[in-house]
Amino acid sequence: MKINFESEFLEHILSRGYEYYLNDAVSNVKIDEDNMISATVIGNSNYEVNLEIEDDIFLDGDCTCPYYKSNGYCKHMAAVLYYLNEHKILKSNNNYDLQNIVNKIPKKDLRRFLYNSLRYDSNLLNKFRIEFNNYFPKLSKKNYQNKIQNAILSCYNRQGYITYDNTSSYTYAMHVFIREAEKLVDDKDYETAFTICTILLDSIPNTSIDDSDGSTGEVAESVIAIIFDIIEKLDYDNAILKNILDYVTNEAKTEYLYNYGIDLKPILEWFIDNELYLNDIKSSLLAALDNSKDKKYFYKREHYVKYLIQINELQGNKNEKIKILEKYSYDHNVFLRYIEELIKNKNSNLAIKLLNERLDEKNYNSRVYANTLADIYLKNKMMDEYTDILYKIFYKYDKYSLDDYRKIKKLYSTKDWDLERNKILENIKNDKDYYYSDSLNKIYIEEKMYDELFLNVCNYKMNYIKEYEKYLLPKYQKEILDIYKRSCLNDAKLANSRSRYREVASEVNYIMHIDNSDEIVKSILKEIKEEYFRNRPAMLDEFEKTIKNLYEYL
């Protein structure tokens, strides 16, 4: 008898689960005396599955994967159930002692069976080769490159792409080699294990895959964990350790220290922290920085500069920090660190000069530079300069920001502020190159200028005005409700689908919850009923679903 379970799962979950089963992703299957099953399924991680089976009926189960926690029965559970049906290992089907049977079979027959099985089952052969690797000829780097490339190609569709639905096949195929590398580490063949790791990492940027579920990143993390395992087992003078560093620094030179979900920075940081090959690392970082000088965006530059500073400090060259930051200050993030260091060394004048040189309305970073200048001026009590830069920030670099407006307001006495505020508001209104409505609204709220706020929003639709409702309803309730009515009726006129009908019903339902809105709601519903309900039964249906007490108003 087979376990009856498929009716409990969604169709696409069954399909993915069967694919996992076929890819040999199910392992460590254990059954207790009560037919409670536990197993491990290899997906984007190793997931633990528990199942409850009774009389060949699937009763319940759970899994440690994220999908199960939010949606219930998952592909990993389905994979284990398919495995159980094909292998017939439930205790109700086990009326024999497997170990005893194996012991009784002549070795010659077992060898013949094993040989024939290995010839025709590539998955079994892979497992066998990994388990008994010492008995096989050692594969060359080229052999592994071909095997890994062929494994990746086997996951491609006809268009030469690994779709989201087939990423589990890719993950499984890569984990075959990951497990082989792990076994080689156990067998102390660190060189071959590292070779496999580099081939796997190098393959990721060239693999055409829908990586929405992070498959390549998960493979990369597993590979990097193996590299760290190798590092921990090696002496500091081991040649393989230098090979690992050379691989990482070469990636740094070619700007792939972090890309495609491959993060080699922790490995480089390990070498720096342990003060190994610091001069080699320094020359590689300098080469990478020189190669990237003409690149406008090179987000790793800041990390490389940080490592250079750290190496120089470890080598006793603490005075090099300012020079390094100055040299690479063409990078925005490095420049900000350079400014911080100048201020820390009480060289605010140079910091101010450099920041002013970089101010440019067309450069988005000028907002940061201007705010940094404002902080320096305020800290040094340079109030004229502080006032001037605040206005530049407000009008140029961070247009009409409420935070900057508040800073400007603090510069004035209550007596002088009204006049200055009115100037600012006029300047904003006269700015024909900027959509200023929201900025004005925020200032009106700040200043409790609710009459001006109402005039600024009254020509907009309901959804826009709702944001300002709490400030306007106390004084302008009738006007607001009239605007809402016009908005609802206009939306009802334009509605041509159930989703649009539902939106209109939701708008009316919203108005119903405003105090003293009964009459306006009745008038809205009366017009909609007379105009649309007879000819648009779907609209009436959506109103009935959305507004619980609809007929009290009709």
Image (cartoon, grey):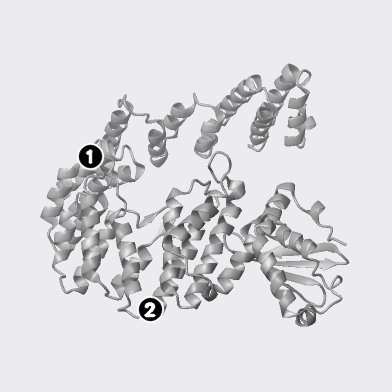
From the viewer's side, name the closer residue of 246 and 512: 246
Q: Is residue 89 left or right of residue 207?
A: right
Q: Report the amino acid beneath label 2.
A: Leu
Q: Which mark is residue 541?
A: none
In percent of the image, x 65 and y 19: which residue is there?
493
Q: Considering only vertical position in the picture, is 252 above or below 530?
A: below
Seen in the picture, residue 36 relative to 331 is either above or below; the reply is below
Q: Which mark is residue 392?
A: 1
Label 2: which residue?
234
> Mark 1 packing: few (<14 Cα in 10 Å), some, or many (20+)?
some
Q: Quadrant of residue 125?
A: bottom right
Seen in the image, is 115 located left or right of residue 251? right
Specify which label sits upstream in the sequence, 2 or 1: 2
**In the image, what residue occupies the spot 43% across and 28% down?**
456
Is 403 or 174 nearer to us in this picture? 174
Residue 253: % across, % down: 28, 56
Q: Is 317 rendered above or below residue 148?
A: below
Quadrant where the N terminus sits is bottom right
> Closer to the camera, 349 or 190?
190
